[in-house]
Amino acid sequence: MFGDAVGLKKRIRDGERIVGVGVPIDVERERLQAILGRDDYAFVSVDSQHSALNEERLVAFCGMAEELDVFVQFRIKHTRHAYLIGNYLDLGPCGVEVPQTELDSTVEEAQHAFYYPPQGGRSFGGKARRGAEGKCPEEYGAWWNRFGVLWMQIESVEATTRAHLWAERWPGVDCVSIGPTDMTFNIKSHPNHALQSVDDCIGYLGRSLEGTRLRICHRNGTPETREKYAGLGVTVFLEQPQD
């Protein structure tokens, strides 16, 4: 199932349909394996924005995921922690999601912290890093820059209408992910805006990003909604375990 994990970044950028599943960071190995066995999931997502963050637990989870060849996408605690992305990645995640992205400066900072030189400014180090064993610094840096996946989460109409600029200016961003609940709150504060629903925003993103290499992820929840959102331009789907 996960033998092509190294190629996930390319698959996302190529616009393949990718499905991932959200799991708690304290999930037990047997439970994780059971979840993964229920669908053809390409990655798992773990969250610290709305959950307790224990760095040792993150290291342990990512170590278990590496043993299972599972790609781990990690949502960091806060937008202003983008400068810490390299530190988070040293604990073992394969990718990062930055919540509530609004400012161009956040996107620039995230890209810089995510990639090793010359694409970025990430510092080299960390025994728990994914895929580091047996690689010299130059080899690992080049490998990581082809491997890691960077998402910026969009949760407002303002960010929705700026995403096409991010595609032009920051080529290291692979995906924009939709935060439907916070986006709904934001839409209600703009009663006269042309975009009046989460689906409106997704459709706008699909049109404005057409022809770029920046993809759209949606927390669609269940498999039944995949086709609906694929029609709006979504290619990456983040769902909940189907028990």
Image: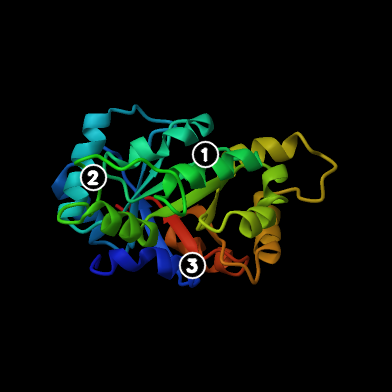
83 in relation to 119, above or below:
above
Residue located at (30% from left, 64% from top) = 6
Q: Earlier in the sequence, mark 2 or mark 1?
A: 2
Q: Colour scheme in the image?
A: rainbow
**Badge 3: residue crowd in 10 Å (few <14, some 14–19, many ≥20):** some
**Badge 1: residue crowd in 10 Å (few <14, some 14–19, many ≥20):** many
Foreground disc of the pair 3, 1: 3
Q: Nearer the viewer, residue 211 or 86?
A: 86
Check the picture and name the quadrant holding the N terminus: bottom left
Alpha carbon of mark 2 to alpha carbon of mark 1: how far? Answer: 20 Å
160 in relation to 12, above or below:
above
Amino acid on which disc 3 is placed: Arg
Residue 60 image position (x, y, % from top left):
18, 38
Alpha carbon of mark 3 to alpha carbon of mark 2: how far? Answer: 24 Å
Amino acid on which disc 1 is placed: Pro
Amino acid on which disc 2 is placed: Cys
Residue 239 image position (x, y, % from top left):
41, 53
Query: On the picture, is 46 further left or further right than 131?
Result: right
Alpha carbon of mark 3 to alpha carbon of mark 1: how far? Answer: 20 Å
Q: Earlier in the sequence, mark 3 or mark 1?
A: 3
Identify the disc placed on residue 62.
2
